[in-house]
Every structure is written in structure tokens, then in C-alpha cells.
Amino acid sequence: MWLWALLPLSLAVFGIAGIWIVYVISVSNGTVNITERFPYISECGSYTPQSTIFSQYCNICTIIGLWIVFVRFQQVRDYGDHGKANTLGVILGFVSCTGVSVLGNFQQSVQRMVHLVGAFTAFIVGLLYFWVQLFLTYRVQPSYDRHWVGPTRALCCCLCTVLCVTMVALANTGHRSAAAACEWALVMLFFCLFGLFGAEFRHVDCHRLTVQRHVLKTQRTSLCVVSNHHLAAVQNTPV
């Protein structure tokens, strides 16, 4: 069902638009001064009124991100891959999305250490999640769009890794404006990586619903399974 593709695409558009809206508000009300240096995303969302907007954006992105992570996990499992890589991927995805919620609700101006833990979890664990997804791109069968999704995902993962290392190095050497620019580019690439799932989610067309009626022990149990929009009845042996 191609409508599933709108889920990751909406996260990409909503997330990128959200951080820039927070940036515009923070510049317009003077809480950040771009003439001195370029601000981090967290600095733009540290002060009211944009701090509440920033928190809500992060919370909504967390919920949509968790949904995407679970759907991707289920899709890979339905393709027959029950390996450790898929399990590792869903764990990393859940932890990374939780980190986004933490950094959004604990602003650095209030709870700096908690905010930094959330940022580390969101960026580093999130990067590991997308590397696992790159591995699964070439492992899972079938992969309808592997010929272009794989290279695009690999390029984005490589760029994210370079930006992450560069951001940390620049921040530790006092080049905060350059580090902040790397952070903005890194976050937008993360949203683009989520958006790439749209190519794979448009092939999600299998819906399963299992209903079991509990009857008397002397009666037979009827089991109905709906798969791919077809209804089939399966009769179990008497209990």
C-alpha cells in the first residue's frame, strides 16, 4: 500500500521544516544573535516561546520515528529475516528516538547534562541504526529499489559519519559556528535517511488480522486469518 510511504516522508518534511521554524522564531525575537556566530539547533530551542514549540516538534518526531522503526522491523521480519541484525536495528531505533525526546524536553539552558546525553543518544545511536539498515538493505529479499536506495543510503550514512566526527572535533577546538553548521547538516541528513524508507514502505501491502473465538471444549475452534485482503478460514483440531 503506497500510503505507508507517506509516513517516513511526512517525518522528513515535518522535521526539517520544524527546526527551521524554530530557527526563524529565535532569530526574530533576538534570543540568538547570528551576527556573533551561527547557533546550534538546541540553542535556538532553549528559550521561550520557541522552546515549547521545539519540545513539541521533538515529541511528535519521536512518536513518528518509533512508528517507522517498528514498521521497518516488521517488514524485514515478514521478508523472512529473523536475524540478530533486525533485532539490533529495532533496539537502536527505539533508543535513538527516545534520545530525541530527551534532548527536546530538557533544554541545555536548564538541564545541560541530561540534554547532552539525549543528543549523544540521538546522534550516535541513530547513526548506528542507519548503518544497520544499510546492511539490511543488501540482505533482505526481495528489495525492489535496492539499485538506488542502497547507494543513496550508503552515501548519506558516510556523510553523517563524517559530519558527526567533524562536529565533535570542531566543538572541542573552539570552532562553534562550524560545529553548529555540521549539526544542522547532520540532522537534515538524518531526516532524509528516514524519508528513504518511503521507497520501501510503498511495498508494505500485507495486513494480518487473527481472530480466535473461544468456545466450549467440546466444540471446534474457528480461526480466521486476513492476509493481503483475502479471507481464509482455518479449522483447528478439537481442544
Image: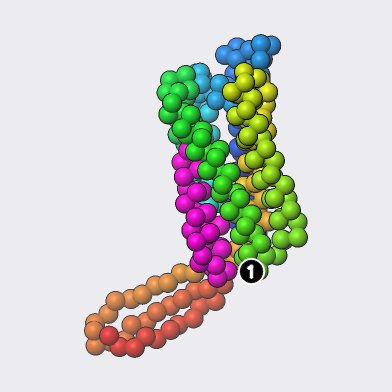
Q: Nearer the viewer, residue 140 or 175?
A: 175
Q: Nearer the viewer, residue 210 or 79?
A: 79
Image color mode: rainbow
Q: Nearer the viewer, residue 170 or 238?
A: 170
Q: Nearer the viewer, residue 14 or 69?
A: 69
Residue extending farthest right:
147
Residue extending farthest left:
217
Question: What amino acid is at disc 1?
Answer: Gln
Measured along the vertical axis of the image, is residue 40 above or below residue 124? above
If the image is split into quadrants, where does the N terminus sit? bottom right
Say which residue appears at 69% left-offset and 44% top-offset.
158
Name the spot of residue 7 as percent of width and height, x first: 59, 50
**Is the magenta region chiefly helix, strand or loop?**
helix
Identify the secondary structure beneath mark 1. loop
**Residue range (magenta):** 72-100
Say which residue appears at 66% left-offset and 35% top-offset.
163
Measured along the vertical axis of the image, is residue 125 above or below residue 132? above
Measured along the vertical axis of the image, is residue 37 above or below residue 170? above
Residue 181 within the segment the image draws in magenta: no
Say which residue appears at 51% left-offset and 35% top-offset.
120
Say which residue appears at 55% left-offset and 25% top-offset.
42
Name the spot of residue 152 as percent of width and height, x first: 73, 50
Question: Can residue 70 be seen?
Answer: no
Residue underneath mark 1: 141
